[in-house]
Image (tube, grey):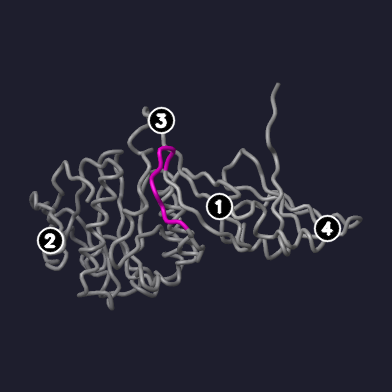
């Protein structure tokens, strides 16, 4: 005997209002939207991206009794359980889109979980199940608390961030002077970076991260991990000009160290132009050790020089622990 649960009804106030939230905000896929004129309704089905499990029927309330249960189909209990393969990615994206989390992330024996409220008030668990003991290092669950500091929240970039990133730092010639990638000349460049970022988050446990203000969500800059293997990654950081001199770089890099430890990175390094004293100071303040100088190693496209430049190679000692 074989059975399966295919569809779950979720009572909504309006089809298009619901689709705007579940598809545009949560990122669900629209599976079907068929008009049923003889019944005066639509058959609307959505599903989480990549899911092969149960799908959700968005059922518009058709009488006062049904309308009275919108947002409270389970009497205040958690209604639906949304599993993810990357909790920090989805948690960060949902926060950036304004989704309200009523219970913060926590570690449970079954995995990492946080509870959020949808537009109608239904409670959802966002869960990354604990991997089996045979899981590879890149599959380990990362604690979402690692992505927050006293003043900052680190989160994955979103498609909607393109204009902000372009204006805040990616197109600023002074900000990008000592970076290894070309200053963005148009939004197309920033959108290409966002495509790259999405690919990195799909392939690795962590990818590029935006540095945002915990107080108001403003984008202050960017950092992250660039994986080369499951145990080796590089890092770096960039801040918008008005975020300089406030200690944000050191605070963000300290968080990246803990994220790297949580991802079982065994070698974390950074390359820095030998004349970029401010970056040198941040790296050394965060415990990176200068291993040496690579001569004629890296072209810095925003310096206007065609010749490869000398860079310092900094690495963080092995064996750090999450603090």
* Distance of label 3 from label 1 (alpha carbons): 24 Å
* Distance of label 2 from label 4 (alpha carbons): 62 Å
* Distance of label 3 from label 4 (alpha carbons): 44 Å
Question: Which circle, 4 or 1, is nearer the viewer?
Answer: 1
Instruction: Kindly identify which residue carries mark 3.
Output: 132
Q: Residue at x 68, y 32 (%)?
A: 4
Given contact means CB atoms under 8 Å apart, are the residues at marks 1 and 2 in contact?
A: no
Assess disc 2: are there few (<14), some (14-19) or many (≥20) residues with their C-alpha within 10 Å of its C-alpha.
few
- What element does badge 2 sit on? helix
Assess disc 3: are there few (<14), some (14-19) or many (≥20) residues with their C-alpha within 10 Å of its C-alpha.
few
* Distance of label 3 from label 2 (alpha carbons): 37 Å
Q: Is residue 236 above or below residue 2?
A: below
Question: Which circle, 3 or 2, is nearer the viewer?
Answer: 3
- What element does badge 4 sit on? strand
Instruction: Kindly identify which residue carries mark 1.
Output: 124
Q: Which label's residue is closer to the chain start, 1 or 2?
A: 1
Percent coordinates x, y for residue 161 in the rendering: 45, 67
Residue 269 falls within the magenta-colored stretch: no
Q: Which label's residue is closer to the chain start, 2 or 4?
A: 4
Question: Which circle, 3 or 1, is nearer the viewer?
Answer: 1
Question: Which circle, 1 or 2, is nearer the viewer?
Answer: 1
Task: Give the residues in magenta.
Answer: 103-111
């Amino acid at each position: 005997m074989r059975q399966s649960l295919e569809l779950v009804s979720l009572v909504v106030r309006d089809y298009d209002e619901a689709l705007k939230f579940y598809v545009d905000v949560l990122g669900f896929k629209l599976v079907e939207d068929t008009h049923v004129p003889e019944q005066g309704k639509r058959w609307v089905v959505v599903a989480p991206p990549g899911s092969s499990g149960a799908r959700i029927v968005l059922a518009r309330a058709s009488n006062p009794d049904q309308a009275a249960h919108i947002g409270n189909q389970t009497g205040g209990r958690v209604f639906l359980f949304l599993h993810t393969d990357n909790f920090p990615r989805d948690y960060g994206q949902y926060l950036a889109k304004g989704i309200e989390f009523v219970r913060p992330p926590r570690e449970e024996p079954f995995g990492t979980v946080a509870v959020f409220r949808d537009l109608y008030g239904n409670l959802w668990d966002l869960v990354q199940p604990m991997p089996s003991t045979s899981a590879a290092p890149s599959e380990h669950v990362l604690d979402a608390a690692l992505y927050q500091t006293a003043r900052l929240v680190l989160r994955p970039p979103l498609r909607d961030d393109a204009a902000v990133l372009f204006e805040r730092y990616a197109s600023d010639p002074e900000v990008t002077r000592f970076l290894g990638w070309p200053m963005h000349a148009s939004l197309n460049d920033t959108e290409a970076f966002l495509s790259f970022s999405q690919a990195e988050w799909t392939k690795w446990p962590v990818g590029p991260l935006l540095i945002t203000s915990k107080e108001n969500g403003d984008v202050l800059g960017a950092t992250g991990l660039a994986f080369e293997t499951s145990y080796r990654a590089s890092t770096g950081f960039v801040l918008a000009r008005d975020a300089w001199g406030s200690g944000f770089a050191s605070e963000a890099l300290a968080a990246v160290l803990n994220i790297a430890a949580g991802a079982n990175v065994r070698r974390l390094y950074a390359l820095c132009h030998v004349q970029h004293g401010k970056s040198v100071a941040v790296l050394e303040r965060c415990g990176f050790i200068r291993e040496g100088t690579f001569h004629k190693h890296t072209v810095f496209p925003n310096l206007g020089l065609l010749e490869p430049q000398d860079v310092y190679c900094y690495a963080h000692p092995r064996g750090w622990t999450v603090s």
